[in-house]
Amino acid sequence: MAFPKKSRLIVILAATLLFLVLFLVKVKNEMHDFQVNYTAGHRLGLGETLYRPWKPDPGWENDGHWQFKYSPFSAIVYLPLSFLPLTAAKGVWYLLVLLSMAALIGISIKAAAFDPGKAIWAGLLAFFVLAKFFLRELQLGQINAVVTAILMGMTWLIVKEEDAPDAGRERTAGLLWGLAAALKPYAVIFLPYFVLKRKWRALAAGLIAISISLFVPFIFYGLQGNWTVIREWVTSLSESTPALFTSQDNVSLLACLNKWTGNPTLAVALFGAAFALLGVLTLFFILRGRSAPKAAFPECALLIVFIPLLSPLGWDYTFLSAFPAVVLIIRHFAAFPRPWRVLLAVDLAVISLSFYDLLGRRPYGQFMRWSVPTINFLIIVGALFYLRMKRNA
């Protein structure tokens, strides 16, 4: 059944009002991660260092838990916002994140090529499954939705380029990839993909964009100061990351193995083996789709859902990046055999309903310590592999 235009307009207006009220009543007083990045933008404008871990120096401004962890280039995004009062800056960022979410959802639904009348319902179902991650992203004022939307823009251009090869479109896709990687390095997961697909223009454009992003902060620091800040970034990450491998909210595969084994050395070895296995399976996935129409969308959806799983610091809300994968599973749900449909129905229900306010402090804490979300999304990955094996996607 098609979704009438009048009903669609009512839903959009209702959603707009709801998110406006949400911001005014709750979110504007939170967005703590955004405030960290807002401060980084202010420091960048003053030519000050961005990375301030603890030091035994009474004159040193220590950021404690609230350390800026992104690249120096990322701070440029927040520089214009740092000239606004904090609440106004939060409002602008909140709107940008909402628009990014809308783009992520819209592109995913369009690329999945639903039958007429089914797209809106499938989109609503997929949003319901992942709603807690979208809402948490808004509450924190994070940048993951923005980066994922950029990657989905890249994905859409690749899909279109495969239908009708176009050098300009491929270069633009590469530039979007480069921008995403400059904002959050985990997007480099697409580098071997471009090599396998022989998309040399996209690869070259992306690498140029990444290279430029490393040099741009010299405007604020000078050439020597720029390399100093980059070294401080690398040092800050290397010092702060290992302590977070067993954090309750870290849902990466490496964190999962650390929690399960209690042995960091063994966890790293198992993660290396799992990484290699997933790499081989992904190679099979891509080669299997060489003759499939619109093969790029499921391939990109797979790589995007890999990001929180394979990144050392994959926080639970970064699973909003699984939206394209969930949409694909809903699109082809009838193609799964009955045992798979039962497993996926349970899996999606657990994902959607396992939030703190429903479970309570202790059960939710145990749920996260068991790394159940990691297993949830490995099942999603398995479903994508099944679809490709059966050539349904």
Image: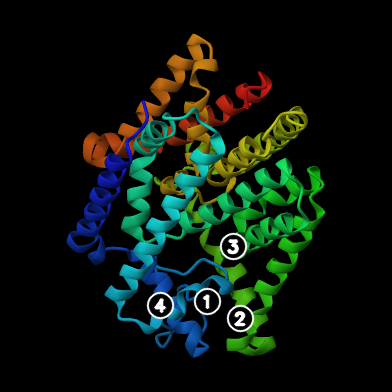
The single residue placed furthest to the top in the displayed view is 338
Q: CA distance from mark 3 to mark 1?
A: 22 Å
The residue singled out by tag 3 in the image is 238
Instruction: Check disc 4 and report its element: helix, strand or loop.
Output: helix
Observer-nearest of 36 and 340:
340
Secondary structure of residue under mark 2: loop
Q: Indicate which disc residue 81 carries.
A: 4
The residue lying at 58 percent from left, 73 percent from top is 73
Q: What x and y, as percent, mark residue 83?
A: 38, 84
- Front residue of this view, candidates 278 and 253: 278
User: How far apart are labels 4 and 1 at the CA level?
Assistant: 10 Å
Query: Which amino acid type is marked by label 1?
Result: Ile
**Which residue, given by chain and number where applicable, does mark 1 sit on?**
76
Q: Looking at the picture, tell me which residue is in the foreground, 352 or 257.
A: 352
Q: Is residue 308 above or below residue 209?
A: above
Q: Is residue 389 above or below residue 120?
A: above
